[in-house]
Amino acid sequence: MRQIPPPSLLYPEDTIPRHIAVIMDGNRRWAREHRVPKAIGHARGAKRVRGLVEACIARGVQHLTVFAFSTENWKRPQDEVDSLMALFVRYLQKEASDMHRHGVRLKVIGDRSAFSARLQNLMTHVEEMTAGNTRLTLAVAANYGGRWDILQAMQTWHSEHP
């Protein structure tokens, strides 16, 4: 991540949202339109998370939630699911130190039980490493299901972090 100035130098505090949520959608469509493999579309989408994190930090947003992998995604072809899991592992490995150095706290929300032990351990490791960080909380929703579940998660999060 690049060096980010304090938000107070850039934006009036009363114009800054406290929480932004993004549904990561359209990566396969982008790949199809650009005639590249789906995995490249997913990787391009994952790369954009870094920019979102940097923009939130620069503006003083306290919480960013990215809805990254729903329960419905398990129904995709196995090679695509495997590619997404490998991408999740690579992202956590590559970004963990930068997140920590820049004060980002990671929280993975959703049902982890379907993920490999390696990925579950990595999620826990990065969460523990970044637990004391307070500049931005990045919540990654993984293995969440349905619109109702999304609404419930957001309401719960909001009630715990007014």
Image (tube, rainbow, N blue to C red):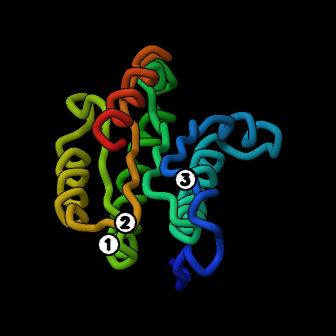
For the residue pair 57 and 67, the one nearer the viewer reads as 57
Q: Where residue 72 sits in the image (x, y, percent)?
A: 46, 19
Above or below for 35 versus 156: below
What type is the residue that disc 3 sits on?
Answer: Ala
| Element type at mark 1 | helix
Q: Where residue 42 sits in the image (x, y, percent)?
A: 58, 46
Tell me if mark 3 has few (under 14), some (14-19) or many (20+) residues whose alpha carbon lies within 10 angstroms of its own: some
Q: Where residue 63 sits in the image (x, y, percent)?
A: 43, 52
Sequence-first disc among 1 and 3:
3
In this picture, residue 146 sits left or right of residue 119: right
Label 1 close to label 2 by CB (< 8 Å): yes
| Element type at mark 2 | strand
| Residue position marked by numbered label 2 in the rendering | 104
Residue 74 seen anywhere in this rendered image of the structure: no
What type is the residue that disc 1 sits on?
Answer: His
| Residue position marked by numbered label 1 in the rendering | 100
Label 2, label 3: how far apart the Cα atoms are: 17 Å
In this picture, residue 73 sits left or right of residue 129: right
Sequence-first disc among 2 and 3:
3
Label 1, label 3: how far apart the Cα atoms are: 18 Å
Label 1, label 2: how far apart the Cα atoms are: 6 Å
Above or below for 66 versus 14: above
Please identify the quarter of the rendering in which residue 160 is found: top left
Above or below for 22 versus 100: above
Residue at the (39%, 27%) spot, across then down? 155
Viewer-nearest of discs 1 and 3 = 1
Residue 141 seen anywhere in this rendered image of the structure: yes
Tell me if mark 1 has few (under 14), some (14-19) or many (20+) residues whose alpha carbon lies within 10 angstroms of its own: many
Viewer-nearest of discs 2 and 3 = 2
What type is the residue that disc 2 sits on?
Answer: Val
Please identify the quarter of the rendering in which residue 5 is found: bottom right
| Residue position marked by numbered label 3 in the rendering | 46
